[in-house]
Image (cartoon, helix red, strand yellow):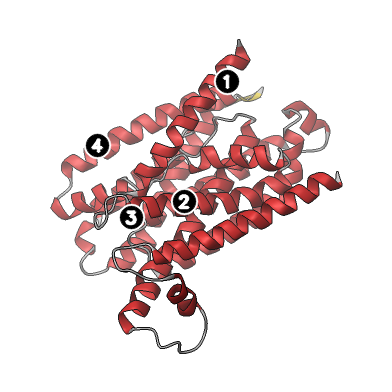
Amino acid sequence: MHAKRFSAHHIYILSTALLIFAGLSSIVIGPMAISYKQSLLALLPGDHELAKHVSLVIHQIRLPRTLLCFAIGAILAICGAVLQGLFRNPLADPGIIGITGGAGLGAALAIVLFAPLTASFPQLLNFAIVPIFAFVGGAISTILVYRLGTDKNGTSVMIMLLAGVAITAISGAGLGLLNYVADDQALRDLSLWSMGSLAGATWTGIILAYCTFGLLFIYFYRHTSNLNALLLGEAEARHMGVNTQKLKRNLIITCAAGVGITVAVCGPIGFIGLVIPHVGRMLTGPNHKTLLPISALLGGLILLVADMIARSAFSPQELPVGIITAMLGAPFFIYLLVNQKSQMS
């Protein structure tokens, strides 16, 4: 028992150290050369006689983007960990059960409907209307999936996953229709947003993302004992006093809210919520008390690395980070499918 805690403790320290190094590297990497020393000096209080243009690039462009990377990656990772524990299925993911698709359709609808407001009230659109529509879209798709997968005998994970696939397909069709009817400005906004990008990081978005992460983490951590009980099976969890239906409903809706915020802030970013919880389980085991913190750390770390690749692979051109996470995550998803197939056979 002590050895396991000791190893988890060291994993936290190593992950945190890697995260700090990746954060500094994220500030350094870009079209304009910035040294690690300059990045450290910029983060320390006081006047360190940095060139004005260096300080401006760090504080207005790279630091906000780096901070947003961690928050978004952490939110997606802990939501993925909770959903996989809730459904006891390694393939459960905000994207696969339809949350991302519904939130994406809601946000896209807001972008197209309120495109005329973009020039006059960009902050209102980006940080009020789009997040609300994204949350509503994610919540509606989540409720639909939950209702389709639930009957008097309980919740069927398989039916929920199939319903999620259907909702994702419908959302994709809706996005295609919106792309067709959108004007030029809305179409450009949709194209950039739909591939997932952190290029538009602002301090308002960062505050929203960190508040969301903090509230989600506290709420999820309060339910780690119930999630651990669910690992034994739904019937066993009920015998232990867990109200499984209420737990599922509350956690699914909370995940929908969190994912809706991430989709609104930076567009859909796939596979973080699918891959990171698996890596966390391999490192610390299935106990959600250790899984949630390590998932948050690794989610932020991997998204930071993916964003650095997106910025530097074809510099000065920039790839959407969603493309990089898909390239990294899709092979792992195929591995999971093959592994599931071998276990069933």
The local secondary structure at tag 1 comes to: helix
Mark with earlier residue (3, 4): 4
User: Which residue does the image show at 52% across and 36% down from the upper left?
Assistant: 93
Mark with earlier residue (3, 1): 3
Q: Residue 42's x, y, as percent?
A: 45, 78
Disc 3/disc 1 C-alpha distance (Å): 35 Å
The local secondary structure at tag 4 comes to: helix
Residue on which disc 3 sits: 311
Picture layout, residue 213 above or below residue 249: below
Disc 3/disc 2 C-alpha distance (Å): 12 Å
The local secondary structure at tag 2 comes to: helix
Residue situated furthest top in the rendering: 345
Q: Residue 230: which quarter of the image?
A: top right
Residue on which disc 2 sits: 303
Circle number at residue 130: none
Cβ atoms under marks 1 and 2 closer than 8 Å: no
Query: Dot 2: within a 10 Å radius of its alpha carbon, few (fewer than 14), some, or many (20 or more) residues?
Result: many
Residue on which disc 4 sits: 176
Mark with earlier residue (4, 2): 4
Disc 4/disc 1 C-alpha distance (Å): 32 Å
User: Which residue does the image show at 81% across and 38% down from the upper left?
Assistant: 241
Nearer the camera: disc 3 or disc 4: 3
Disc 1/disc 2 C-alpha distance (Å): 26 Å
Mark with earlier residue (1, 2): 2
Q: Is residue 215 left or right of residue 288?
A: left
Q: Quadrant of the N terminus?
A: top right
Disc 4/disc 2 C-alpha distance (Å): 27 Å
Q: Is residue 263 visible?
A: no
The local secondary structure at tag 3 comes to: helix
Residue on which disc 1 sits: 340
Nearer the camera: disc 3 or disc 2: 3
Kindly identify the amino acid type of the residue bearing the numbered disc 4: Gly
